[in-house]
Image (cartoon, coloured by chain):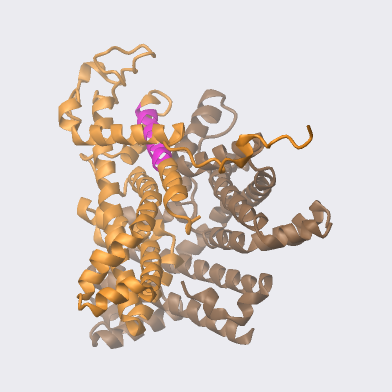
Chain colours: A orange, B brown
Amino acid sequence: MPEAPLPVAVAAPPLRRQAGPPPMVLFGLVWLSLMLVVALLADLISPYAYTALDLRNRLSPPIGFGGTWLHPLGTDELGRDVLARLIYSIRTSLLIAFGATIIGALVGTSLGFLAAHFRGLVEQAVLALVDFSASLPFLILALSVLAFFGNSMVLLICLLGLHAWERYARIARGLALSAGAQGYAAAVRQLGASPWRIYGRHVLPNIASTLIVSMTLAFPEIILLESGLSFLGLGVQPPETSLGSMVGYGREYLTRAPWILLAPAITIVVTTLSVSLIGDWLRDRLDPTLR
Amino acid sequence: MLRFLAVRVLRAALTIALVVTFAFVVLRLSGDPAQIIMGADAPPEAVDAFRTAWGLDRPVWEQYFHYFGAILSGDLGRSMRDGRDAIVLVLERIPATLALTLPALAVKLALGIPAGVYAALHRNSLADRMVMVVAVAGFTVPSFVLGLLLVLVFAVQFGWLPSGGQESWKHAILPVVTLGFGGAAVLARFTRSAMLEVLGQPYIRTASAKGVPWRAVVTGHALPNAAIPTVTIIGFMVGSLIAGAVVVESVFSWPGVGRLLVVAVANRDLAVVQCILLLVAATMVMANLVVDLLYGLLDPRLRNQPRAAGGL
């Protein structure tokens, strides 16, 4: 019969987004958790101190390339264990990236809220600062500040914290303005809530997902910036070690001992890739306004 | 249109002023500018002369205007290392940097835009997925890692290309590829999402429904509209022609502005750093200004309501 009932499948609602994260994102989550565990437990799991020398086994290759289990990822010119250095580098790089991401989000969001709350001159000042930030490549700005003030870990974290602050500021200001136009913020204000309470307890939770997505986008950028600066010898200073400074150091031994460079390089790439994948996925799920 | 132009130029001037102010504040915060600009071992009478010349014995506000005036007249101090004018030192390096960044820009545009457009037009095809994978790789692999890997393969393993230096055009190949790849990936990703956004618009469906051939829909309706966001990122790339190769120049020992900056930062040669900072900011602001004007050309809507485009 031509008028056969339509198959059920056609009437069914369109396929929803799959419940769990796709495999690549899952991989990203697993890798990032692994990195976090390594960073937190660095003292427990590291086979050696990251400055310990093993002068009998200098430039020993990793397992699979003629190395032994004594130094699974090989050693460098001074006989320092690459695995141990990698573990501590992950700790340093993640600490800087997390610290800087949080500082950037706090500074940017606060300034955005201030601009939205006070409007007028304050808003214009914040917008001028946003223009200023957007007008300079961040690497150049960071390099000049390091030139003027010298280098320290705290300065480095604060400096990288300024990366992307203007993005949070834009988002926070825009969303706070539109929240102010909605009923709930006005209602709380009428009830006599202080601005702190309105922004902290009511506006912030409503725009948090957009801010979190921005943080996942800024985080890999900060890892890349820190490793770039450290690679140039202008970021993390010895005896501290970070993923970028390991690559910079390994560069001297590119021909004789490429593993010194490859281990941290691969770690940087997989970590930034993981966070980017998670970020893209979160963006698709949480936030239709960002592309 | 005149109002649009005026607002843009004013914003650009304001941004430059802010950068100069930033340099002034940072310079003041980091110690005695006379000592810093002249160098630690400058004779005291020279430092005093500098102080008087720049008016450092006067109130801060007056100093600020003096500083502004000096910069406007091109007086950017002398390099601590060889006593030459910082601006001369920087300008000398620009051709070398452009020799890398201009071909790299050509690579980015020639690869990135067609790849992005093709991927968007063939969404979810194998080619699209390949472009996206390469684009993500281009974003997540830092330039120094890519550069060193290329050196490892093409210079160390095969010995086809030199690993660093600036003797012949062959020396430029690896740095240009390193720079171009990352930028092309970013551009492809950006172009793709801009195209997808436009292709989803109702006017595209309308044009198709009217019977306009698909090729004409793409070239006549989709591409011009997708060009608007893409121009922004190209403007950023043009703006960073001078300073966009800091890391890559260091990897390949290329004697350009970026290398100069890294050495100057390591030696705290503040006059040179300040000079590069201002130069980069000026280039960037100029490029942004041109982009804003191009916006006006590309999108008549923006001409009539400049505030909507200018705000946040």
Q: Position of residue A92 (x, y in %)?
A: 24, 41
Above or below A225: residue B1? below
- Residue A132 left/right relative to B105: left
Residue at figure coordinates x 39%, y 76% from the top left: A181
Q: Position of residue B194 (x, y in %)?
A: 60, 56
Residue at figure coordinates x 47%, y 48% from the top left: A284
Question: Quadrant location of residue B34?
Answer: bottom left
Residue at figure coordinates x 46%, y 39% from the top left: B141
Q: Position of residue B172 (x, y in %)?
A: 58, 43
Can the viewer see residue A172 in this picture?
yes
Can the viewer see residue B84 in this picture?
no
Residue at figure coordinates x 39%, y 14% from the top left: A65
Nearest to the observer: residue B70 or residue A162: A162
- Magenta range is A260-275
Q: Is residue A42 magenta?
A: no
Question: Quadrant location of residue A124?
Answer: bottom left
Nearest to the observer: residue A245 or residue A107: A107
Nearest to the observer: residue B170 or residue B231: B231
Counting the numbered discs, the total is 0
User: What secondary structure prevails in the magenta region?
Assistant: helix
